[in-house]
Structure formats: structure tokens, C-alpha cells
Image (tube, rainbow, N blue to C red):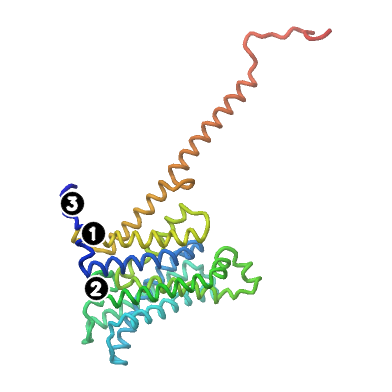
Amino acid sequence: MSDVLGALMGPGAFFDDHTFRMAFFGTAVIGLVAGALGSFAYLRKQSLISDVISHSALPGTLGAFLLAVVVLEVDGRNMAVLMLGAVVAGTLAVGLAQYVTRATKLSIDAAMAITLSLFFGAGMLLMRIISNGAYPGKGGIQDYLFGNASVITKADLIASISVGTAALVLMVVFWKEITLRTFDPDHSTVLGFHARAIDALMFITIVIAIVIGVKAVGLVLMVAFVVTPPSAARQWTRTLPAMVVLSGIIGGLGSGLGAYLSIAVGGVPTGPLIVLTLFAFLVLSLLLAPGRSLITRARGRTRHRRILLRQLVAEREAHIEPQGSTTLPGAGQS
């Protein structure tokens, strides 16, 4: 253990390296945006939608790459081009899942599973086509499957911050509509809010949150960035604004810490270690959060059992007459 700690890279040396800085801040931005926006999917019990979006981002990014290289003859690795393709594909996937639910008797879970499989299969087909073809700039295209934080550039970071900020601004501007739709959809309809438009807006923001992380983390692991921070934040908070803010903080802090540890230790993949770091935050929240922690609940149950046991013993003793006492006939009569 001491050898590991001794070999750990210090923060000064870490932040002096440009590549390491980009990996740290890039993953932190991804975690912050995904954590904050994922709160609504968590509260609506549609966390699987993040998995649908992340898997549908694969054919979106690869399709955008082919379109840029073959048709437009421009740089297919441009972050804006790939992000646009992923957003379009993710939005179409969410819309398809919602449409299947409305048009058929399939549940939303089944519709999302079918959509996920469809888009992911298309993505794997496009990946094979690109791998076998002579397309310029195709090297490392498989990183979108598992991610590679070391390839984040300054331009990628700026694009992630810009797009992530736009998604957060949309959430703030339409806060009332999204909140009401999340907690009381019937009331929001009565007030005249267009349900499909609000759903589309909310899912688009989640699409953006997931898409900006596909290059660094990979579509396989992005679902953890959307689900885990809100799950941890929910244990500590009682209001929606506090939950969204804390979820963003946990996502950003956990992602940055995971990226730092993966590089400082050396030889550890960034994405999986970030997921484990976020999971550690969740475990600590489940164990230590006041009022909702597993420890607090266990103590409460033990205390209630003791109180109930004392009450039962007291009631039993109150109904038992003292031994040896007798009541003579006519006693107490004048």
C-alpha cells in the first residue's frame, strides 16, 4: 500500500502536463453536466433512457463521420460534426421509443430495449464498414465504444463546455415546465403544457449530456454518469434544486478524481475507474447520509423494536394480578 501511495503522481506534476489537464477538466465537465441533467431521468424512473441514448450515439457519430468524409469531404473527426450526428441519432432513438410505447401495447422498458438493440446493431455495422474501408482519419474510431480520455483536446474541451452550458441553460429556462411534467404530468397537461414538447426538450438535454462524454468515456460507460450521481445526491437532499446542484457536484468531482487517480497510478483505464469512483460516492451516500442512510435506518428499526418490546412488557405486567392476592366474596360491600 505504501509503495502505491509513494508512486502516486502529485497534483503539481499532474496539472503541469497539458494532456493530463485536458483529461481532468474534460471528464469533470462531462460528469457535472450529465449528473445535473440526469436527475430528471432518475426522478421519472427512466434511467434506462440514458443507456438508449448512449448506444444510439454510436451510429450517430459514425454516420456523421462517413457523411463528412465521403460526401462533404471535410475532416470527419471534427468534434462539432460528430456531436451533431450523435445528438440527431440520440433524439431519434428517444422519439422512436416513445412512439412505440404510444402506438403499441409494449411498455416503455420493452420499447427502450428494442430501440437500444436496433441502434447499437446499426452502429456496430457502421464501425465494421469504416474499419474495412480506406477512409482518412479513421484511426481510433473504436474509442467511441469504450472511450479514451487521453485524446481530449482543447477544442474538444471548449466544445463540451459550450454545448453542456447550452443544455444547462435550457434546463434552467424551462425549469417550471420540466419540473411539473416530472412530478405531476396530469396537472401540467391541464395547465396547457404540451407534454410531448416538454418530454422532447428534457430528453434532448440528456442526449447532449451523454453525447459530450462519448469520446472520453465511451458509450458503454456513459449510463453510469447519468444514473449514479443523482442516486447519490438523492440520499442527501429533500428539494429538487438541491438535488440537481449536488448531483452535478458529485458527477464533476467524482469524474475529475477518477481521471486523476487513473493517470496518477498509471496503467489504469480512465472510464472504468471514474465509474468505480462514482460508485464509491454512492456507497458512502447510502451508508452515511443523515435520515436516509442504511445505518440510520437500521438504528431506527432497532430503536423502534426496543420501544415496542418495552411497551408489550409493560402492558403484559399491567394485566397480570399480583400473586397470592385473593378476593373474598362480598369484599368491598357495605
Do the residues bearing badges 1 and 2 touch, measured as CB atoms within 8 Å? no
Q: Residue at x 66, y 9 (%)?
A: 325
Q: Nearer the viewer, residue 318 or 84?
A: 84
Q: Earlier in the sequence, mark 3 or mark 2?
A: 3
Cα gap from disc 3 to disc 1, whole angstroms: 15 Å
Instruction: Read off the residue under disc 3.
Output: 4
Q: Please tell me how crowded label 2 is: few (under 14), some (14-19), or many (20+) other residues with Cα within 10 Å.
A: some
Tell me the mark number nearer the camera, choosing from 1 and 2: 1
Q: Please tell me how crowded label 1 is: few (under 14), some (14-19), or many (20+) other residues with Cα within 10 Å.
A: few
**Could you tell me the amino acid type at mark 1?**
Pro
Cα gap from disc 1 to disc 2, whole angstroms: 20 Å
Q: Earlier in the sequence, mark 3 or mark 1?
A: 3
Q: Regarding mark 3 in the picture, which secondary structure is present there? A: helix
Quadrant of residue 87 in the image? bottom left
Please tell me whether residue 191 is drawn above or below residue 75 in the rendered image. above
Cα gap from disc 3 to disc 2, whole angstroms: 26 Å
Q: Earlier in the sequence, mark 1 or mark 2?
A: 1
Do the residues bearing badges 3 and 2 touch, measured as CB atoms within 8 Å? no
**Could you tell me the amino acid type at mark 2?**
Val
Q: Please tell me how crowded label 3 is: few (under 14), some (14-19), or many (20+) other residues with Cα within 10 Å.
A: few
Please tell me whether residue 289 is drawn above or below residue 78 in the rendered image. above
Q: Position of residue 92 (x, y in %)?
A: 44, 79
Instruction: Read off the residue under disc 2.
Output: 151
Q: Residue at x 34, y 53 (%)?
A: 280
**Could you tell me the amino acid type at mark 3?**
Val
Q: Regarding mark 1 in the picture, which secondary structure is present there? A: helix
Instruction: Read off the residue under disc 1.
Output: 11
Q: Residue at x 57, y 25 (%)?
A: 313
